Image (cartoon, helix red, strand yellow):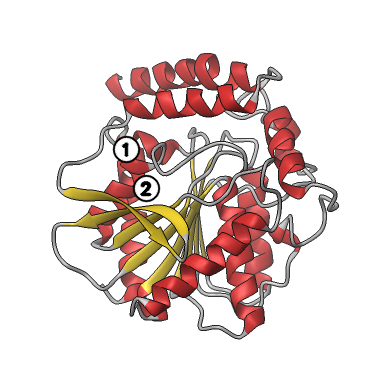
Amino acid sequence: MKNNLALQAIKAGLRLSFKLPSLLPLPVTVLRSGMEHSAQLFKVRSDVQVESVTLGGVRAERLSPEKRTNKVILHFHGGAFFTGSAKTHRALGAELAARAQAVVYMLEYRLAPEHPYPAALDDGVAAYRALLTLGYKPQHIVLGGDSAGCAHILSLAVNLRDQGLALPAALFMISPYVDMTLSARSITTLKKRDPMLTKYALQRGSDGYRDSIATCDPRISPLFADLYGLPPLLIQAGSEEILLDDALRLAEYAGISGVYVDCQIFNGMWHNFQMFNAILPVADRAVDQIAVFVKQYMGG
């Protein structure tokens, strides 16, 4: 009963504070500051050290667990390509660092529309190369992402493969946004049930990110890229988010391409529900499952 009340309260709060504003043509700066302010609700655990650093010339936050480790997660935050930051995802990054016993680099990649494609990809390549220069082995690196950050890490993995660079050990994705055509069935069928996302906000973000590139272009919508030879992939999504089909189709297409995929759909959950791990047992378990996956493929 208590858990159900918490679920309903969170959903109601998201509809009011997140979904409603996202339907309005508010300035990007207003939406960014609103997301930064909301992030203060999520407390950062005290056993993780937070430092501002640069990685390959790209700003980032380094979140380190108490025990020294040679394992690393390079994470790309969400925010529909035009919002979000290391600060908004600091609490989640700290949970991942502590539970997976890995250093998390939360990358401050350049945002659209000021910096359209390929700015974020270039930042990701620079950061990954910097990790290798610092001495991290590819088999000890995992790429992580949530929402639009998943498009970035998938594009990064494809780019690294095409360049012939050593690939990371694995990828994990939380509520992936990887199809900028926004033509999936769930975009329509779940628009009333989704307490957080709107097609308008997603399209606004992707339009700024892609600039003049077609929405179906694999560079912009990596769902349609050649996924052959990519590392193992963990996907988590909620059954009530309009991006549900992005997760399901990505799992299908990656599997057809020979990629190992673990796709976990959580009943009654919404976009990025893992952020609420301090409140909801199901979110807490989901983050634990990400940590198990990371440890499994990094040998932790």
Residue 91 visible, this orientation: yes
Please, is residue 80 above or below residue 228 in the view? Answer: above
Q: Is residue 74 left or right of residue 93?
A: right
Q: Quadrant of the C terminus?
A: bottom left
Residue that badge 1 annotates = 277
Dot 1 lies on which element? loop
Residue 251 visible, this orientation: no
* Residue at horizontal 41 percent and vertical 44 percent from the top: 86
Between the C-alphas of marks 2 and 1, the distance is 8 Å
Q: Nearer the viewer, mark 2 or mark 1?
A: 1
Please, is residue 46 above or below residue 292 in the view? Answer: above
Dot 2 lies on which element? helix
Q: Residue 271 appears at what percent x and percent y? A: 52, 37
Q: Residue 248 appears at what percent x and percent y? A: 63, 53
Amino acid type at circle 2 is Ala
Q: Earlier in the sequence, mark 2 or mark 1?
A: 1
Amino acid type at circle 1 is Asn
* Residue at horizontal 43 percent and vertical 75 percent from the top: 169
Q: Residue 38 appears at what percent x and percent y? A: 41, 24
Q: Is residue 282 left or right of residue 125?
A: left
Please, is residue 279 above or below residue 12 in the view? Answer: below
The total of numbered circles placed on residues is 2
Mark 1, other Cα within 10 Å: few <14 / some 14–19 / many ≥20: some
Q: Quadrant of the N terminus?
A: top left
- The image quarter containing residue 80 is top right
Asked whether 16 or 106 is in front, the reply is 106
Q: Residue 111 appears at what percent x and percent y? A: 60, 44
Q: Is residue 299 left or right of residue 214?
A: left
Residue that badge 2 annotates = 286
Q: Are marks 2 and 1 in contact (CB under 8 Å)?
A: yes
* Residue at horizontal 52 percent and vertical 68 percent from the top: 126
